[in-house]
Image: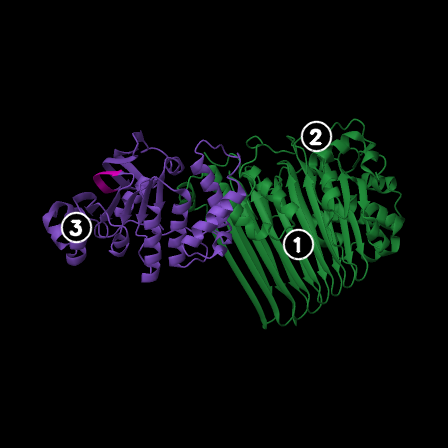
Chain colours: A purple, B green
């Protein structure tokens, strides 16, 4: 059975500010979707709401994974059902080693029934796996022993997100501007990494301003967000058009949504 | 630290694992409640002490009685000196083997895991139960090299000259009210002498156990590390959980001579009804290194600021302090560094965690005396507050009487960041696992300084403290 992530009429507020105003989207395993849109249109809000950030309140609508309504579920429950968010701003966790953290995460995700305190995935098996994935991503083995994102460069942080994606093998991966702030070599590494990982088992939602990530991971569907709604959905050609012409045409075609577009994206600190 | 072990342990939520107690019916001696000259003389008499010590105690009692209670630090209004038993002797003799120790007491130490640890990785052990040391051992090869590791009472009898030369020289009775109290009623504690050039490879450990309700435990520890020698001393402390309060007021004096090293590690895990008011001070001479590693968990109120006086050029002092204040607890802890000589250096690293309405305070002093030029001192305090009901304060005191010095102080306070929790939870960790991981990471730089066994123990204690902290 192909898994389905279904987003229905999703309204999301941060504090008292409504940001998403009725988003509809269906992502199946194996599909690649791109989400584009100007700053403040609500792209990152959708990403956080899907992953279950407590500050992003769903006021209407629902998120379902294979018919299970996860709208009220905490982030860890969603992760166990196969949701993954590659963060635009990965969080630093001082004193926690990458390998220790990932071993816990992998144990929970692969054994969703695992109770706290029960055994972790075998050390030998885990070590080999993380070593192989790091090699594929061109990462120094030393990363496994470093503290999570602590002192990492922008590119290292993004690579760390892709490493987590590779280890956790989610059914649905949301990449929130994974290509932002990277030089072109780093974008290539991340893009190739994603291309290798995605396949029939993974549904991907790529949030991006740029075209590079999409070159390596051609989307079947391109959605354009404006003022908290998906205003257009098209093929890869739509992404090319937006890159060539910007959002002026989109705004002109959807004046009501354009008027509601926030001046800047709400990003957590 | 690796977190190979599961993040949560299988112990019940909120359980203080060491809260059990033994019957006190069989005790060899129990003083009456309260404190006066008669009790002090009785303690001295029981111990067959020389006249000078009896006089020292009585004079100290006068100082204790004449001093007001400190009006800073924590709330001691419930501490009733008249309700305390100042001396209790559970066993009539000290055991040379665990088989010599009365069965109830031996069982207690078995449950605390001491005999097992002794076999695995200790060079010597002292076990103090109430007022007296009930068991003692020292590896034979160390004894042959002239190392002395005994209880302080025995040291007074067996090494009177060495004892008198140093006792009370680092912390005189007049130092503070609680040092005076300890000087009046002290009993037990460790006495260590490490001869010139002798380096002890494994730690020496003492374990302090309070068993009775309203008990006052006043051990007195004196450590002398002679020139070029080195020692690592570890102490652990627990007590049963009672509804009324006990008092633990120790004095620890350390002399680290030229070129010597001393590391003193405390992992204190008192139950929530213990007032823990301790004075610890070391004097570090030329090119020596003194380190305090101070883990404060448990207790109702802890006031403890291990001090290092850097007496001669080249002396270094370092204090790593960790405090965990849970519900109903106040950890007022920190460190003092006194630079008395040029070219001395010190470092203080303090980490505190407050949760469940607990309160932690960092209180520290860096003092540079006149003419102590080219001194360096670096102080770093980090506080982690886990919920809005909890509190953390920082009281750094810096007194510098010399221009040519380098003093740095950094302090940071962080709440368990929501973003950190969300990040870890989005990878499938439960809220409890994620919080425990963040806290473990927070103390990691300090835990990594501990020998393996203690690091594991401290992490386990922190995990226990974290149980039920969320949800």
Horizontal side of A119 relative to B103 (left or right) equals: left
| Local crowd size for mark 2, using a 10 Å CA cut-off: few (<14), some (14–19), many (≥20) | some
In front of the other: B97 or B30: B97
Residue at disc 3, secondary structure: helix
Compare residues B398 and B327 and report the one nearer the observer: B327
Residue range highlighted in magenta: A18-27
Residue B336 relative to residue A125: left or right: right
Q: Residues within 10 Å of mark 3 (few under 14, many from 20)?
A: some
Residue B59 as seen in the image, left or right of residue B81? right
Front residue of B321 and A69: A69
Cβ–Cβ below 8 Å for labels 1 and 3? no
Location of residue A212 in the rendering, given as x and y in whole percent from the top left corner = 27, 56
Element at label 1: strand
Whether A26 is among the magenta residues is: yes
Same chain for labels 1 and 3? Say yes or no.
Answer: no
* Chain at numbered mark 3: A
Residue picked out by circle 1: B292
Residue B355 location in percent, x, y? 51, 41
Q: Residue B395's x, y, as percent?
A: 55, 54
Mark in front: 3 vs 2: 3
Label 1 to label 3: alpha-carbon separation: 65 Å
Mark 3 to mark 2 CA distance (whole Å): 75 Å
Q: Are marks 3 and 2 on the same chain?
A: no
What residue is pinned by disc 2? B21
Let me know if residue B366 appears in the view: yes
Q: Quadrant of the N terminus of chain A?
A: top left
Residue in view at x 13 percent, y 55 percent: A248
Circle number at residue A238: 3
């Amino acid at each position: 059975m192909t898994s389905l992530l279904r987003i229905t009429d999703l309204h999301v507020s941060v504090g008292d500010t409504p940001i998403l105003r009725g988003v509809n989207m269906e992502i199946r395993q194996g599909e690649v979707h791109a989400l584009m849109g100007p700053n403040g249109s609500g792209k990152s809000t959708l990403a956080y709401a899907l992953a279950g950030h407590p500050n992003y309140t769903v006021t209407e609508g629902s998120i379902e994974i294979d018919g299970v309504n996860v709208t009220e579920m905490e982030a860890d429950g969603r992760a166990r059902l196969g949701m993954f968010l590659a963060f635009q701003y990965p969080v630093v966790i001082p004193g926690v080693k990458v390998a220790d953290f990932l071993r816990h995460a992998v144990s929970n995700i692969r054994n969703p029934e695992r109770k706290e305190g029960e055994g972790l995935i075998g050390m030998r098996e885990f070590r080999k796996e993380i070593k192989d994935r790091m090699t594929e991503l061109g990462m120094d083995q030393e990363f496994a022993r470093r503290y999570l994102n602590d002192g990492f460069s922008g590119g290292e942080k993004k690579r760390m997100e892709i490493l987590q994606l590779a280890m956790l093998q989610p059914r649905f991966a949301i990449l929130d501007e994974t290509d932002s702030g990277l030089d072109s070599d780093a974008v290539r590494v991340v893009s190739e990494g994603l291309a290798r990982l995605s396949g029939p088992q993974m549904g991907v939602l790529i949030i991006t301003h740029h075209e590079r990530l999409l070159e390596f991971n051609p989307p079947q569907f391109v959605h354009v967000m404006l003022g908290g709604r998906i205003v257009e959905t098209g093929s890869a050609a739509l992404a090319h058009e937006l890159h060539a012409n910007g959002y002026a045409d989109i705004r002109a075609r959807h004046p009501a949504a354009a008027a509601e577009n926030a001046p800047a994206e709400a990003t957590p600190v | 630290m690796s977190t190979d072990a599961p993040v949560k342990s299988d112990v019940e939520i909120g359980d203080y694992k060491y809260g059990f107690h033994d019957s006190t019916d069989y005790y060899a001696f129990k003083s009456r409640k309260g404190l006066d000259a008669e009790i002090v003389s009785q303690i001295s008499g029981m111990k067959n002490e020389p006249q000078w010590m009896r006089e020292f105690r009585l004079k100290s009692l006068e100082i204790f009685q004449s001093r007001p209670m400190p009006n800073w630090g924590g709330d001691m209004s419930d501490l009733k000196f008249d309700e305390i038993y100042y001396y209790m002797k559970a066993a009539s003799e000290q055991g040379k083997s665990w088989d010599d120790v009365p069965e109830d007491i031996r069982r207690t130490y078995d449950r605390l895991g001491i005999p097992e640890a002794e076999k695995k990785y200790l060079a010597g052990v002292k076990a103090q139960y109430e007022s007296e040391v009930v068991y003692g051992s020292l590896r034979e090869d160390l004894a042959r090299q002239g190392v002395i590791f005994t209880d302080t009472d025995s040291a007074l009898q067996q090494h009177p000259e060495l004892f008198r030369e140093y006792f009370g020289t680092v912390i005189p009775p007049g130092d503070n009210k609680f040092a005076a109290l300890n000087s009046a009623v002290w009993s037990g504690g460790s006495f260590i002498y490490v001869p010139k050039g002798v380096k002890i490879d494994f730690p020496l450990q003492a374990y302090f156990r309070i068993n009775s309700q309203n008990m006052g435990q006043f051990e007195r520890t004196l450590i002398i590390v002679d020139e070029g020698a080195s020692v690592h001393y570890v102490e652990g402390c627990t007590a049963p959980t009672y509804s009324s309060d006990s008092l633990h007021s120790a004095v620890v004096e350390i002399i680290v001579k030229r070129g010597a090293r001393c590391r003193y590690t405390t992992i204190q895990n008192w139950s929530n009804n213990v007032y823990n008011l301790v004075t610890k001070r070391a004097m570090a001479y030329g090119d020596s290194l003194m380190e305090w590693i101070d883990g404060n968990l448990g207790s109702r109120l802890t006031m403890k600021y291990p001090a290092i006086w850097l007496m001669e050029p080249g002396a270094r002092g370092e204090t790593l302090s960790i405090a965990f204040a849970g519900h109903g607890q106040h950890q007022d802890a920190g460190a003092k560094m006194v630079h008395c000589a040029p070219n001395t250096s010190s470092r203080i690293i303090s980490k505190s965690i407050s949760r469940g309405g607990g309160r932690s305070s960092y209180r520290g002093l860096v003092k540079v005396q006149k003419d102590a030029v080219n001194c360096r001192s670096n102080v770093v305090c980090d506080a982690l507050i886990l919920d809005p009901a909890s509190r953390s304060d920082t009281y750094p005191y810096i007194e510098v009487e010399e221009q040519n010095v380098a003093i740095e102080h950094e302090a940071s306070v962080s709440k368990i960041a929501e973003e950190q929790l969300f990040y870890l939870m989005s990878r499938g960790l439960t809220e409890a696992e994620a919080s425990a991981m963040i806290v473990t990471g927070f103390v990691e730089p300090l835990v990594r300084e501990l020998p393996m066994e203690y690091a594991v123990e401290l992490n386990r204690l922190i995990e226990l403290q974290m149980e039920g902290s969320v949800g």
